Structure formats: structure tokens, C-alpha cells
Amino acid sequence: MTLIECQSELDIALVSDLRQRLLDALQAGEPLEIEASAIRRAHTAALQVFLSAFVEARSLGISISWRNPSPALLEGARLLGLVDGLGLTDTDAA
């Protein structure tokens, strides 16, 4: 299993690095887990990168999941209507 640890601020300046780390992990073909407890702020661009990774993982049959999604991540996903697409549950985002 590959573990991706997220920084506290996922702003536009960090999206390229995040995207590359997720792509590298998907190319390894192993299950992927995203440690998200540190996220305090996630820009829309970061959530779009996560969504793209989830879509790609599903198309490749690779397991992808969250570990400890932070309240900020959950709120951002809820506001953008991405709870289902990001593999979060309605109870996580309530």
C-alpha cells in the first residue's frame, strides 16, 4: 500500500506536486491511502486533483481511500458536491 501524506495547506502552489505524487502512486498499481488529518485548508484545485485521482484509480481497479479526513477536507468536498466522487460518506461530511 502507498501512503500519501497531505500538508496542512493545499493551495494552488502545491497542486502540481500533489498531482505528481498521486500519479506516481497510481502508476505503482498498489492500493493507495491518503492521510488527510493535517489538512486545514484545501483549495478547489486540490479537490479537483483528488477527484481526478479517484476517477483514475477506479478506472484502473486500484483501491483508493482516505485516512482521517479532516473537517476542512470534508467541508470543502460537501460545498463542492464532491463527497461521493471523493469516496467520502455523507456521515463524514455532516
Image: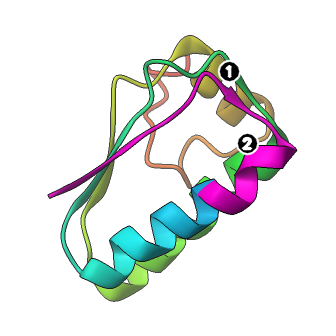
Q: Quadrant of the N terminus?
A: bottom left
**Magenta-highlighted residues:** 1-17
Q: Position of residue 4 (x, y in %)?
A: 37, 47
User: Residue at 50% across / 35% down in the picture?
Assistant: 6
Rendered residue at 72%/61% (across/down):
16
Residue type, label 2: Gly
Q: Which residue is nearer to you in this view: 63 or 34?
A: 34
How far is the residue under mark 2 from the one under mark 1?
Answer: 10 Å
Is the residue 7 above or below the residue 52 in the image? above
Q: Residue furthest left?
A: 1
Mark 2 = which residue?
A: 81
Q: Is residue 63 left or right of residue 23?
A: left
**Residue 19, image x, y percentages:** 61, 64
Q: Residues within 10 Å of mark 1 (few under 14, many from 20)?
A: some
For the residue pair 77 and 91, the one nearer the viewer reads as: 77
Above or below residue 28? Residue 52 is above
Identify the residue under disc 1: 75
**Could you tell me which residue is drawn at 58 percent across and 40 percent down?**
83
- Residue 58 % position (x, y): 38, 75
Q: How is the structure coloured here? A: rainbow
Q: Secondary structure at mark 1?
A: helix
Task: Tell me, yes or no, if residue 78 can be seen here.
Answer: yes
Q: Which marked residue is nearer to the observer: mark 2 or mark 1? A: 1
- Is 41 contained in the magenta span? no
Identify which residue is drawn at 56% across, 13% down. 71
Q: Position of residue 69 (x, y in %)?
A: 44, 25
Q: Residues within 10 Å of mark 2 (few under 14, many from 20)?
A: few
Mark 1: amino acid: Glu
The quadrant holding residue 72 is top right
Q: Are marks 2 and 1 in contact (CB under 8 Å)?
A: no
**Is residue 54 shown to the viewer in this render?**
no
